[in-house]
Image (cartoon, rainbow, N blue to C red):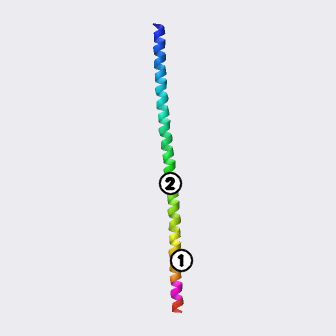
């Protein structure tokens, strides 16, 4: 009777320990995946914002240079 109880208890303990391990591993995986997603999303946003800033700055420079050229050419014509 005592031996059966020990064996049954041991089996239950193994099953419980195994289930806990699976649950913990699953939770860790979810947390890690979530963190990686957040980091990746943040990096992508940062890179996109940086590229947009560079493109906008470049376009503004081109427009300004073009306007200055037109104004200078116009003034030279007047003179």
Taking the view exactly as shown, the residue that stands out farthest to the bottom is 79
Query: Above or below — where is 55 with respect to 22?
Result: below
> Is residue 5 highlighted in magenta?
no
Tell me whether circle 1 and circle 2 mark residues in contact (CB < 8 Å).
no
Question: On the rendered image, what quadrant is the C terminus found in?
Answer: bottom right
Q: Residue furthest top?
A: 1
Tell me which residue sits at (47%, 15%) in the image. 9
Q: Tell me where residue 78 appears, x and y as whole percent.
A: 51, 91
Query: Tag 2, which secondary structure?
Result: helix
Q: Which residues are magenta?
A: 71-75
Marks 1 and 2, how far apart at CA: 31 Å
Instruction: Please report the residue visible at 49 percent of the width from the left and 42 percent of the height from the top.
Output: 33
Question: Taken as a whole, is the magenta stretch helix, strand or loop?
Answer: helix
The residue tagged 2 is 44
Badge 1 or badge 2: first in the primary sequence: 2
Q: Is residue 72 magenta?
A: yes
Q: Examine the rendered structure and indicate whether residue 69 appears above or below residue 47.
A: below
Q: Where is mark 1, residue-wise?
A: 65
């Amino acid at each position: 009777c005592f031996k059966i109880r020990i064996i049954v208890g041991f089996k239950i303990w193994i099953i419980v320990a195994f289930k806990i391990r699976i649950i913990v591993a699953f939770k860790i995986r979810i947390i890690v995946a979530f963190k990686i997603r957040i980091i990746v999303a943040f990096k992508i946003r940062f890179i996109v914002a940086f590229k947009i800033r560079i493109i906008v700055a470049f376009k503004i420079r081109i427009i300004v240079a073009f306007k200055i050229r037109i104004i200078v050419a116009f003034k030279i014509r007047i003179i």
